[in-house]
Amino acid sequence: MDIYKISASHLEAIKEQPFQLEKEMQQLFETHLSLLTGLTLVKSEFLLKQFRFDTLAFDHEKQAFVVIEYKRDKNQSVVDQGVSYLNALLEYRDSLIVEYNEQNLGQTLKRSDVDWSQSRILFVANAFTDYQKNATNFKNLGIELIEFKRYKNDLLTVNFVERSKSAPALPQSMASEKGENASLANITKEIVVYDEDTFYQRGSEKTIELYERFKQAILNLDNELQLVYTKFYAAFKKDKTNIVDIEIQKRALKLYINAVWGSLDEPKHIFRDVSHVGHYGNGDYEMIISNSDQLEYILSVIKQKL
């Protein structure tokens, strides 16, 4: 990525200033972990048996642990290390929960609170090779890549390397593998990556079509909105914050706006206050949608959060 500064009537190229040490990259990334990734820092340099995790973090939306590793040398393998770390994370679950609770992060975590199928490893580096990107291009591998670059004038870029939409899943048949493939086989049994396909499995032809219409309309509201699929809903995020969440069901959609009840101008009063009701989506505003009659009105309410 080329970065330029507008200077009078010309453009001035901003040169990259690579991190010289992995530790330097790690300290900067951890300091701003919540802003950069939406994750909560649990422990830096966490020791787990024979492993040392650079960063142990927790994803409160997915209720899952995340291990972050930093790489200055882009020629290093990420798949082998990622598979080993994922297996360690899944094997020593109680140790992670104990560490989380000892850090006093605002809640007491129980084993049943954690969605272990959402465990993942993040690798952070200045850049990754095409080989590394292709080697991790599997939906259920649980390994993700982030390119983190520093430039002069105190500028940073963060690029979440996305899997291709046609990325295959590691075959479940690997679950019977032995020897060197046993670790990878364990991951195929444990890790689940939720995407549009898994989301649609809970819907019907009618609600899928309805969701598609709302999805496109919401994304058109703001170019900075990002769509992320979770176990229970599709999240429309801006700056790592959920703006709208949508659950798909066989007969209808459930749409949530992430706002405190009473803070939005909603003159038709068609949303329900769920501030004291258990629900998966974020926010106090819920609406059950079976058609698109109120689409424009719903969009006008959502705009107040953008």
Image (cartoon, grey):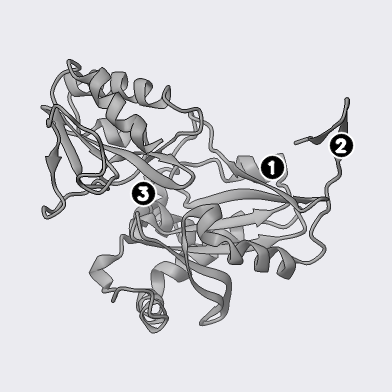
Amino acid type, residue under disc 1 in the picture: Tyr
> What residue appears at the point 49 percent right and 44 percent down from the top-left corner?
239
Q: Residues within 10 Å of mark 2 (few under 14, many from 20)?
A: few
Q: In the rendered view, would you say 111 is above or below 239?
A: below
Q: Is residue 145 left or right of residue 257?
A: right
Choose the circle earlier in sequence order: 2 or 3.
Answer: 2
First of labels 2, 1 by sequence position? 2
| Residue at x 34%, y 74% (from the top left corner) | 106
Q: Earlier in the sequence, mark 1 or mark 3?
A: 1
Which label belongs to residue 83? none
Q: CA distance from mark 1 to mark 3?
A: 23 Å
Could you classify mark 3 by the number of other residues whose Cα lies within 10 Å: few (under 14), some (14-19), or many (20 or more)?
Answer: many
Q: Nearer the viewer, mark 2 or mark 1?
A: 2
In the picture, measured across the screen, residue 48 lies left or right of residue 241, that is: right
SS under mark 1: helix
Against 117, residue 199 (above or below) is above
Q: CA distance from mark 2 to mark 3?
A: 42 Å
Q: Position of residue 102 (x, y in %)?
A: 39, 84
Quarter of the image where the N terminus is located? top right
Residue nearest the observer in this picture, 236 or 234:
236
Q: CA distance from mark 2 to mark 1?
A: 29 Å
- Return the residue at label 1: 131
Residue 51 horizontal side relative to residue 94, left or right: right
Going by the numbered disc 2, the residue's amino acid type is: Ala
Per the image, label 3 sits on a secondary structure element best described as loop
- Which residue lies under the disc numbered 3? 192
Q: Of tags 2 and 3, which is closer to the observer?
A: 2
The amino acid type found where label 3 is placed reads: Val
Q: Quadrant of residue 19?
A: bottom right
Horizontal side of 105 relative to 35 (left or right) equals left
Q: Nearer the viewer, residue 71 or 25?
A: 25
Mark linked to residue 13 = 2
